[in-house]
Image (cartoon, rainbow, N blue to C red):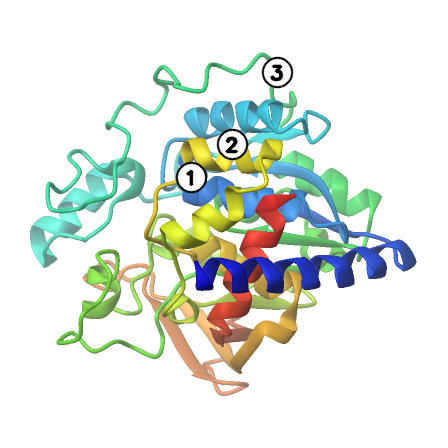
Amino acid sequence: MGLVRRLIGMALAAGLMLAGGAQAAERRKVIIDQDAFEGPGLQPILMLLNDPTVEVLGITTVSGDGWQPEETAVTLRMLELVGRKDVPVVAGATFPLVNSKARNKAREAMFGPLAYRGAWTEQWPADNTIHRREAHAPDVIPPMPEGAPTTKPLGISAAEFMVQMARRYPGQITIIAMGPFTNLALAARLDDGFAGRIAEVVMQGGNLLGSDPTAKNDEFDNQMVMAPRISFNQIWDPEATHIVMSEAWPKLTLVTNDSTRFALADKSVLDAATASGSPTARYVKAIAQPNFPLWDEMEAAAWLDPSIITRRARLSMDVDLMPGANYGALLTWGAGKGPALGEREVEVVYAVDPARLKAMFVERIRR
């Protein structure tokens, strides 16, 4: 109970400070680009929705962890249950630009299996203690325990929505990309001036500091420990990642998986977050599973309050597009020391304060 009390105390203090500041400043505009079809992908959306300093212009969906049609339905239903039907949901890309399940299988046949395949998963490993919904075809939306949504997504594509919002609010929007980057790449190709109208793109992935393979790691670390530059958000659609990492964004930030060390949403954290009984808390209590790393929550938190970042750097970055074992892997150089082939300089977040991250999660979900 000591940890729960500390988390609640930190959360309440942070909430009071943010509430006061929000009244004095215009809310920050954000588009959430997400591949959410289960709890860990929905929780960071709720953190941003519940922050008084943020105006969520819309939630765009993209295949990755799950297939886009199912993600869209789950996101719509989540907004209904927490009373936020005012936020538009916009369906995005179902398939990567070039990569495919067949290509991925051929890659694995030559170079060994990937630990995680997202929507291409055919059978969830029996030794993984976290439940995952059964595999299905891309156009299938299985029965949802929470019920099917009654609302519909907007009648335009995610790329079109991003371009429209960027033209309406030039220089004011942050896109928080929590999944693969297909929608962003399509928007960039739809409008040559799109990137320059976006204030910042925040993305997540990579384990650039590496890990000790002999240490006790959480069950999600297997791929990152053995192949730290092969990160799912990038390898699902490597060509889209390359486009995004070559565009003229005023600011591009990568929050790495290194940052989630020691930051699991265990039972005590979830109990503290859901104790209030608010609509958001009730929803998370129903859908959350303990012991997920706070990957996307950490990305949201680092953007919401950069003071929680404890280690950062600036690198030139791209991805490997050559067919082979490293297809989609992150490439890095010192800032300004890349091959000058269009790679961007990226603000890289290596570490955040885990206690403050958990407190922010608790405070936003409690609302």
Q: CA distance from mark 3 to mark 2?
A: 18 Å
Q: Residues within 10 Å of mark 1 (few under 14, many from 20)?
A: some
Q: Quadrant of residue 97?
A: top left
Residue 318 drawn at (x, y percent): 44, 69
Return the mark for residue 216.
none
Residue at figure coordinates x 59%, y 73% from the top left: 308
Q: Quadrant of residue 197?
A: bottom right
Question: Which residue is tagged 2?
Answer: 283
Q: Amino acid at mark 3?
A: Thr
Query: Which quarter of the rendered picture does the N terminus lie within?
Result: bottom left
Q: Quadrant of residue 99?
A: top left
Query: How many numbered dots are placed on residues in this image?
Result: 3
Which numbered disc flags the more N-terminal residue, 3 or 2? 3
Question: Which residue is tagged 3?
Answer: 151
Q: Amino acid at mark 2?
A: Tyr
Of the two numbered discs 1 and 2 in the rendering, the one whose residue sits closer to the viewer: 2
Residue at figure coordinates x 37%, y 70% from the top left: 261
Which numbered disc flags the more N-terminal residue, 1 or 2? 1
Residue 10 drawn at (x, y percent): 61, 64
> Is residue 319 left or right of 326 when viewed as pictured?
right
Are the residues at dot 1 and dot 3 in contact (C-beta closer than 8 Å)? no
Q: CA distance from mark 1 to mark 3?
A: 20 Å
Mark 2: which secondary structure?
helix
Q: Is residue 200 placed above or below 126 in the rendered structure?
A: below
Question: Which residue is tagged 1?
Answer: 39
Residue 348 drawn at (x, y percent): 51, 74
* Front position in the image: 345 or 262: 262
Which numbered disc flags the more N-terminal residue, 1 or 3? 1
Query: Which quarter of the rendered picture does the C terminus lie within?
Result: top right
